[in-house]
Image (tube, grey):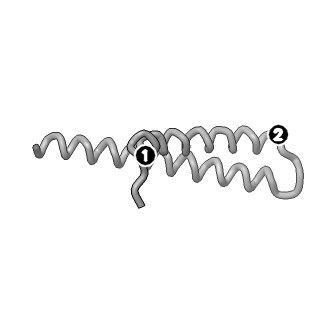
Amino acid sequence: MWISKPIYESLPYFYLLAGVISLSASMYVNHWYWPTICFLTGVLCLVGGLVVLLKRRDSRRTHRRSS
């Protein structure tokens, strides 16, 4: 599946934003297990966004050096 370049480039930032929103929601939600669910979702989104950003950065650096 191919997606357009602007969407592809903005996905890590969307993951980071979703992580921050989810972490902040975990502080304000007090129903059932939602604070735990929001916290875990936020941490996973933040880690995923950082991994994607760092992998892309490293890949682009090695591509630039090799060409």
Q: Secondary structure at mark 2?
A: helix
Location of mark 2 (residue): 28
Q: Position of residue 42 (x, y in %)?
A: 64, 47
Q: Which residue type carries mark 1?
A: Tyr
Label 2, label 1: how far apart the Cα atoms are: 31 Å
Q: Which disc, if any, is residue 50?
A: none
Q: Quadrant of the C terminus?
A: top left
Kindly indicate the quadrant of the structure image that contains residue 15.
top right
Kindly indicate the quadrant of the structure image that contains residue 37.
bottom right
Query: Residue at the spot x=59%, y=38% of the render?
Result: 17
Query: Residue at the spot x=80%, y=53% of the render?
Result: 34
Q: Give the residue furthest to the left.
A: 67
Q: Give the residue furthest to the right.
A: 31
Q: Position of residue 56 (x, y in %)?
A: 34, 46
Is residue 64 rendered to the left or right of residue 50?
A: left
Circle 2 or circle 1, nearest the eye: 1
Q: Position of residue 23 (x, y in %)?
A: 69, 42
Is residue 17 rendered to the left or right of residue 28?
A: left
Q: Earlier in the sequence, mark 2 or mark 1?
A: 1
Q: Which residue type carries mark 2?
A: Tyr
Query: Residue at the spot x=63%, y=39% of the render?
Result: 20
Q: Could you classify mark 2 by the number of other residues whose Cα lies within 10 Å: few (under 14), some (14-19), or many (20 or more)? A: few
Q: Give the residue furthest to the bottom.
A: 1
Q: How many marks?
A: 2
Q: Secondary structure at mark 1?
A: helix
Location of mark 1 (residue): 8
Query: Residue at the spot x=26%, y=43% of the render?
Result: 60
Q: Position of residue 18 (x, y in %)?
A: 62, 43
Q: Could you classify mark 1 by the number of other residues whose Cα lies within 10 Å: few (under 14), some (14-19), or many (20 or more)? A: few
Q: Quadrant of the N terminus?
A: bottom left
